[in-house]
Image: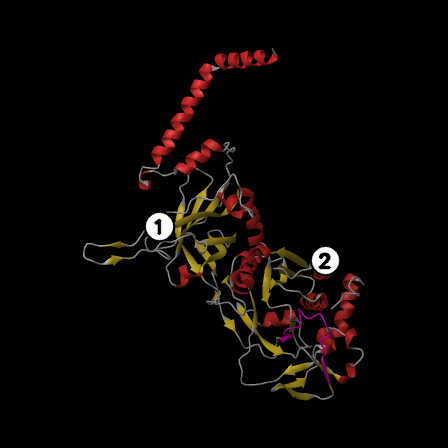
Amino acid sequence: MSKEKERRMFVGIVWNCAAELKLLLTVLLFFCSLITLLHFIPSRLITFSPIDLGSCISTPAAPLHFVSHLNATNSSTPSATTPPPEPPSLEKDRLLQNGVVKRTFNPFGSAAYNFILMSAYRGGYNTFAVMGLGSKPLHVYGKASYRCEWVSSDKQKNPISVVGHKILPDWGYGRVYTVLVINCTFPVPVGSGETGGKLLVHATTNDGGDTSFNTTDTFEALSETGQDFVNFTSVYEAPPKYDFFYCGSSLYGNLSPQRVREWLAFHVRLFGEKSHFVIHDAGGVHEGVMEVLKPWMDKGYVTLQDIRDQERFDGYYHNQFLIVNDCLHRYKFQAKWMFFFDVDEYIFVPKKSTIKSVVKSLSDFTQFTIEQMPMSNKLCLEEDRGKSYRKWGFEKLVYKDVKTGIRRDRKYAVQPRNVIANGVHMSQNTVGKTTHKTEGRIKYFHYHGTIAEHREPCRQLVNTTAITVDGIPYNVDTTMRDVAATVKRFELKMIGTTLQRTRQ
């Protein structure tokens, strides 16, 4: 009896839903017929396969997610809901009517950016400097160009446009990218008396890379409010805040905190109270180095800038040419003299002179270069045996390379207001004279290879005033050793015992 009731109940349900079942069966029959038909249609006439349609029927539709192209390409794992875009169709080789096989070349992606902006600064009432990186082939083998445009915030004033003068200060050392300084000089002052404005740069490839295209990328290099202009004017027209300013190259690697400590104490004492040091961290300022810099930062002598993001872009030597040019233009109106040298190099002036008297004697020049005194990074005096670990690096490394007849790198100083762009060893873009005749007035001692050395540098102790090692003659020079005690007392006076336990 119960089975009969179940049969009647099933028949009733089917009868009541007959319309819905007919519709469902009809739809299924239609799609199955369509899938079967698609197999006989040439593939060039359709943009999807029967399999794709079948999967749409058999698989529940996933919710749509809109993800920007940038986010999709930066994702470390593929997403099931955001499949990668289909690759572009290839243009294939073809046979021409004259029997010639026409070969094709299919480009994909982009090898380098047109321009990578780091900074832009005013250089006067009508001039600006824009610092960045450009694709090296565009400039070495192409004719990439720039146009500068000032757009006033006052809509009643028309934009002003001029050709941008590009400077490549890295002497061809660039790798994938080369350093660019773009000088934008307008025929009249811009921004003066206005509520503000912005500087646009139009970067054109001029058929560089692909002669089928002439691409122009426009970017905003600088945006200025009326108050920004007032602030610039106050710095521009005032006397420089600092007598001496240090612009450091990119610091990278596992630096020795002790060597950085010695270098900083020595040069703060040399340059004096009205001096400032800008240190650029390209990965070299680890915790130990930071502990050395912090007391001087707190005293107002040091500014530390994190430039590690520039490592994304393959330029020469951690993009140091870019970094020093940014430093030049960022601070050019705040300093009388700017010095460019490294943290394993020590500037020295004779005892009867001061750094102020030296630059005063060279004030007729925009730029002067400094002679190098190369020092051994491992030879020390026998008398320091057993106690060398208590001495500072420049105190115990006293053997100078005296080999003659070779050209040695020089470092330099400039009066920054008269410099348009600069390099690592000197500037080739100055207004005014340059002199290299500074022997006897100023020099620098170079302790190459010591800044990243964490072990005791004295690996060979000798008891002689002259020695030849690996074909290089050395003579004892105690110039720096003689000032070590004075520098140590200066550090103690300025920041106390904070750094007494600094490690190599």
Q: Quick check: 34 above or below 459?
A: above
Q: Magenta segment: does it hold 456?
A: yes
Residue assigned mark 1 = 90
| Quarter of the image that includes the C terminus | bottom right
Q: Give the label on residue 294, or none.
A: 2
Coordinates of residue 149 in the picture (x, y in percent): 42, 48
Q: On the rendered structure, is 375 left or right of 88?
A: right
Coordinates of residue 235 in the picture (x, y in percent): 58, 52
Q: Quick check: 357 above or below 53?
A: below
* Region rendered in magenta: 444-461
| Quarter of the image that includes the N terminus | top right
Is label 2 in a helix, a strand or a loop?
helix
Coordinates of residue 186 in the picture (x, y in percent): 42, 52
Q: Is residue 495 visible?
A: yes
Between the residue at mark 1 and the residue at mark 2, the CA separation in whole angstroms equals 58 Å
Between 298 and 233, the residue placed more toward the observer is 298
Count numbered badges in the picture.
2
Coordinates of residue 46 in the picture (x, y in percent): 34, 38
Label 2 Cα neighbours within 10 Å, binned few <14 / some 14-19 / many ≥20: some
Q: Are marks 1 and 2 in contact (CB under 8 Å)?
A: no
Q: Magenta segment: does it hold 64?
A: no
Between 495 and 136, the residue placed more toward the observer is 136
- What amino acid is labelled 2 in the image? Lys
Between 443 and 11, the residue placed more toward the observer is 11
- What amino acid is labelled 1 in the image? Leu
